Image (cartoon, rainbow, N blue to C red):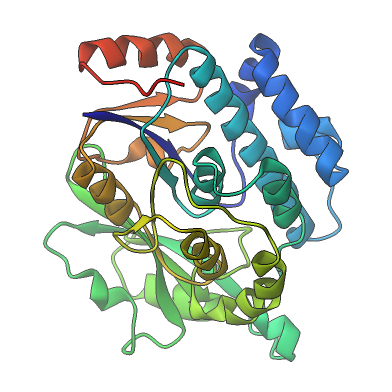
Amino acid sequence: MALASIFGTNLFQYQPDGVIEFYDAHEEVRESFRQASEWTGIDVEPLLKQNGEYADDGERIQVVSVGLAAAQLGIQDVLMKKGLRPEMTGGLSLGGLVGSCVAGAIERRDLMELLTRGEHRPQDEETGGGRPEGIAAAYLALDHDPDHYYGEQREGVWKAADFGCDAGGKIRIVLLAGYRDALEKLAAGEPEGVVNVTEGADLAVHSPLRAAAREASRARIERVPFKDPALTLCSCLEQRTLTRADEVCAMFVDNVSAPISVVDLTQGMKDHRAQLGLVIGPSPVMNALQYPFPVVFVDRPQAVSQAVAAVFEHGVRLRRG
């Protein structure tokens, strides 16, 4: 039975309080932010505190992504120092890229530089269409078919993420992406609270509308010297284990426009006999979900001792070296 490190995505922003506490308490986190700042040219303060002023939404997403990745990697370093070395890793969207880094498939500097050079403009802007994009969270009854909310019968709406069930096992959570007017039309036709269009998010993430961004970033990603993962690396794009450098590279390319799934990620870890998962860093979405094995949310320094205790409680075998 094994330990899994799980990394969440940013969904455009996160509350930095827990990360700041980690930064103040642990040199490993301070060093992670120092390196990220050196490699990207972004000051530590906006990376850490998420308080910068940005020229556009694309610049903001870049800074948030680098800051979250620095936090996740620094907290993982803290756990490693405590002897909590995972047998497997993976994550959701940005977290999948960070998980690849923890698995040894990409160097930290290469990851940080990729995050600062991502394509973040809406595809319509590139082609001159000008139809605004957006995302929406759908909270569905367990007996409700999620296909009702996207696909061919819903012009301009796609499934971006399957988060599985909430922690209580009563609601299925799906992230929808597409054109904002199509999302608003869908929300207006459903009972109040079922489909909630997100304010301030103008990118149809993990949808076909990101196809141009995917191709724009392909050459840059394919120049990175990926390596075969040294740890079991589970994908969130499908229920699959990535074992070769070219598979990791392909995941980085497809991650821009393909839908993601917590269900596929965690079921893959369960198939590899994960006995305990550590959900690392701030991730309010990941912290609200149901998992097929026990998890500890390591989003504040005091959770490190809880993670250590959980390893002993569940009799988890730790990797050495």
**Most foreground residue, 1 or 25:** 1
Quarter of the N terminus within the rendering: top left
**Most foreground residue, 303 or 251:** 251
Image spot of residue 164 (x, y percent): 27, 52
Q: At 40% from the left edge and 26% from the top edge, which residue is drawn?
A: 297
Image spot of residue 112 (x, y percent): 72, 47
Image spot of residue 24 (x, y percent): 69, 13
Q: Is residue 111 visible?
A: yes
Image quadrant assignment for residue 17: top right
Would you place residue 194 above or below residue 159 in this image?
above
Q: At 43% from the left edge and 24% from the top edge, which residue is drawn?
A: 85
Q: At 33% from the left edge and 51% from the top edge, which residue is drawn?
A: 265
Question: Would you say 26 lies left or right of 80 here?
Answer: right
Would you place residue 305 above or below residue 36 in this image?
above
User: Residue extending furthest left?
Assistant: 143
Question: Would you say 12 lies left or right of 289 here?
Answer: right
Would you place residue 90 above or below residue 313 in this image?
below
Q: Is residue 9 visible?
A: no
**Most foreground residue, 250 or 237:** 250
Image spot of residue 249 (x, y percent): 55, 63
Total labels: the figure holds 0
Question: Would you say 21 lies left or right of 302 here?
Answer: right
